[in-house]
Image (cartoon, rainbow, N blue to C red):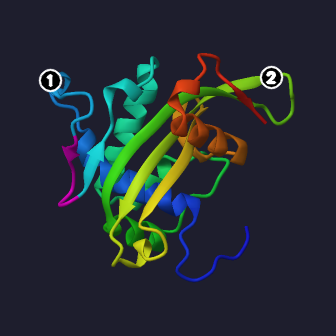
Amino acid sequence: MSPLRRNQLTFPSLLAIVLLTSASGCREEENASATPPSTPVTGLASTELIFPDSLRVADESANIFVRAALSQCAKGNYEAFRALWSAKQDPISRAEFEEGWQAVHRIEVRGLQKVLLAADQDAAASEPVYVLLVEVALDPEAKAGKRAPLREIVMMLVREHDQWRLASAPKAMRDWIKQQNAAPANNSAVSPSFA
């Protein structure tokens, strides 16, 4: 793992910010279906979460995982957050986790799409994963928001032992979902594959 500059947030740090602060807006309620598709939901204190119904995927287990992950992170429980990560990657440190979530004002889910990820050992085999694009607005006065108060975060949902887990997305996948979001008319019904 490469050394980080002091005060620099890594991809997982930003993911923690997104997940930690947005969860309270994803609580399931009996009347949740009455919420309009793009209506902002108020989260912790001044944190706003926007997760349009149009971005939810056909696999309800993935939607449930996203809601559960966000809920755990909103509680500020670092150990629960760590349990959400892929066993193949190290999550962020407790210090990054605790610093980052306090700076978030708004989280907007901009994309959630199923794609294929090539397996390491067998290039012909691939596994379905979900790529998630989130726009995060940070307090520009907070330490975490000084460098860039508006950020796009991309992560993957991967299956491990029949459960969804969070993971970093490969660069090609990050670039692809950002391009898809920038030009929605070009979206393809075919799931792309990534190495």
Q: Reply above or below: 176 against 61.
A: below
How far, Cα to Cα, is label 2 from label 1? 41 Å
Q: Position of residue 159 (x, y in %)?
A: 59, 31
Q: Name the amino acid type tagged 1.
A: Ala
**How far across and how far down the image is residue 176, in percent?**
65, 38
- In this orientation, does residue 107 appear? yes
Q: Is residue 162 visible?
A: no
Q: Residue furthest bottom?
A: 6
Which of 172/12 is in front? 172
In the rendered view, would you say 192 is above or below 160?
above
Taking the spot 39% from the left edge, 70% from the top edge, the residue there is 98
Q: Earlier in the sequence, mark 2 or mark 1?
A: 1
- What residue is pinned by disc 1? 34
Estimate how packed mark 2 is, as few (under 14), some (14 to 19) or many (20 or more) residues with alpha carbons within 10 Å.
few
Mark carried by residue 125: 2
Q: Which image quadrant for residue 191?
A: top right
Figure quadrant of residue 39: top left
Does the magenta-highlighted stretch encompass residue 43?
yes
- Across and down, in percent, residue 102 comes to 32, 68
Q: Position of residue 65 (x, y in %)?
A: 42, 34
2 or 1: mark nearer the eye: 1
Relative to residue 156, is residue 193 drawn left or right? right
Q: Residue at x 52, y 80 (%)?
A: 7
Note whether 29 is above or below 189 in the view shown. Answer: below
Q: Quadrant of the N terminus?
A: bottom right
Q: Look at the image and tell me in which quarter the C terminus lies.
A: top right
Residue 132, above or below 17? above
- Which residues, given as a range, are shown in magenta? 40-46
Q: Quadrant of residue 36?
A: top left
Q: How many marks overall?
A: 2
